[in-house]
Image: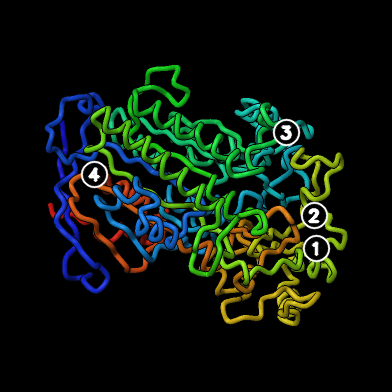
Amino acid sequence: MEIRRRWSYLGAAVASAVIAMAGVPGAALAQGHDRDRGHHDHDSKDIRHVLLISIDGLHEQDLARCVGANTCPNLAVLAQSGITYTDAHTPGLSDSFPGLAALLTGGSPKTAGLFYDVSYDRTLYAPSDTNCTGKQGWNVVFDETTGIDAENGGALVHLNGGGAFNPQAIPHALVNGVCKSVYPHDYIKTNTLFEVIKAHIPGAHTAWADKHAWGYDWVNGPSGQGVDDLARTEINSIDPATNTDYTDVYTHTEKFDDLHVQAILNQIDGKDSTGTKNSPVPTVFGGDFQTLSVAEKAPFAKGGGYLDADFTPGPQVSGAIAYADAAIGRIVSELKQRDLYRSTAIVVTAKHGNSPTDHTKLVKNGDTLTKLLEANNYLDPNGNFGQNNTSTGNLNDGSGLVGTGMVQTDDVGLIWLRDPSQLSQAVSTLNANLGCNAPGICADGPQAYILYGPRLARRFGDPALGRTPDIIVQPNPGVIYSASKKKDAEHGGNAPDDSHLGLLVSLPGIEHARTISAPVQTKQVAPTILRLLDLKPEWLHAVRAEGTSVLPGIGDDR
């Protein structure tokens, strides 16, 4: 059976937000994948595949500038057959975990439960507590150390993270009286679009590639099996050619991103990500590029970041954008060669941007927020919380302290108090130290805020349930809670530069570029992908919970 649906662009109802719109022929969902190999009409506008690319660090201004200046010709071609959203933002937080969760679940951290790759959960037990009889409250670290290479502090010598989970990184939860391991796919609180697609499209195949081999296991969703072909690539693994990881300089990161490009090319060619096995062309697939993010964070003095407040790219950012554009060109070329281009929708966006882009706004006073909390005994005064204090000295080896609370800082501060009853006192201390002079937290400007209590609960969930931070501090734009000389920008929060992203949806059948200036959120990408594949967006739990709508400009005129 073949189900056919016609898609159109919304009309005058959003005319004030839409610069240009036109009708789009329908998308059809075929049951099998073989029809893409020469069996469909040349003029068919059927969408049978969706390719999602996250160019981490891609600001809306980057996309507009490079398309306008024709310095990203391949992205410009996609824009000519697609819709560009000029006011797209992340839903609340802009770290990689919540940023990708938005794209894959249709939800914010409130529903997906992902605040950072290093976070805290008051309900969990330590990895060593296999009976769940000890103290609760664990510093959850799902990053490069989630692979077994990191067990006992081992070196990250394998590109695939060692081929298994690090058991010392896996906490436990008491579920219906049974003590169970909590893997990353157990940690996410809602399903992903991969799971929906596999459940509702007979014979569907899914694939994804990201930066941490095992920490990103959560993309599988709670079933643990949403992604058929999850490329296990670890950006922090040691490249034997250089004896460094792939984040030292953006040109080295290109080598890592090339692995994701090659995985996608292999999948387009009917192979798995490794290119060693025959596999169906995925219904939904894609991956993450890190090169631009590394270039943006690189020190300004070494050619990183932007030259001015107008997003004029410095040499590293220019090179990184050119790399990403060329990579997309290779992918599109392969889609065309395999006669898949006209049946594939392509979404280009980012998990997050980086802040600040205007170097003159950069403030690096060190982690004054954590110091202030420690000095006032809201956290251990010596920093002995969670994975900051392991009995061995090795990060994420399972020997960290339990029930300590924690703070996670970048260009934001997420605070889980050691004692939640100290909330009012902690907020008073923060409010008394808003200035940028020590011991101030540099949150005294009009765009800064301290979020807690009912306002925080409405936006991010109730901290009493265990996952949500007690306090979120958004400092002045340009502040990063670091003194590191290795980077001049960061992400994680809700600053303008790390939350305002590029978003482009290229669809077969659009003959002219469309631009929509209405405010949208990146969490709308997930239901849009399902709609394009003729699936119900509300099959995503987060879409139902948060009322997430399909992106404007894509409608149903059945």
Examine the rendering and report whether any part of residue 65 can be seen. yes
- Compute the Cα span from label 1 to label 4: 50 Å
Instruction: Using a 10 Å C-alpha cutoff, classify the residue at mark 1 as few (fewer than 14 neighbours), some (14 to 19) or many (20 or more).
Output: many
| Residue that numbered label 4 is attached to | 534
Query: Which of the numbered marks, if any, corresponds to residue 150?
Result: 3
Kind of residue at badge 3: Ala
Query: Quick check: 290 above or below 285?
Result: below
Residue 290, numbered label: none
Looking at numbered disc 2 in the image, what kind of residue is underneath it?
A: Phe
Nearest to the observer: residue 398 or residue 205: 205
- Relative placement, left or right, of 180 versus 282 is right
* Residue with the mark numbered 2: 385
The mark that comes first in sequence, 2 or 3, is: 3
- Mark 2 surroundings: few (<14), some (14-19) or many (≥20) residues within 10 A: many
Residue 359 in the image: state x and y as whole percent.
61, 66
Mark 1 and mark 3: Cα distance apart in space: 27 Å
The residue that disc 1 covers is: 379
Q: Secondary structure at mark 2?
A: loop
Q: Are marks 1 and 2 in contact (CB under 8 Å)?
A: yes
Residue density around tag 3, few if under 14, some if 14–19, many if 20 or more, within 10 Å:
many
The disc labelled 1 sits on which kind of residue? Leu
Q: Upstream in the sequence, badge 1 or badge 2? A: 1
Alpha carbon of mark 1 to alpha carbon of mark 2: how far?
Answer: 7 Å
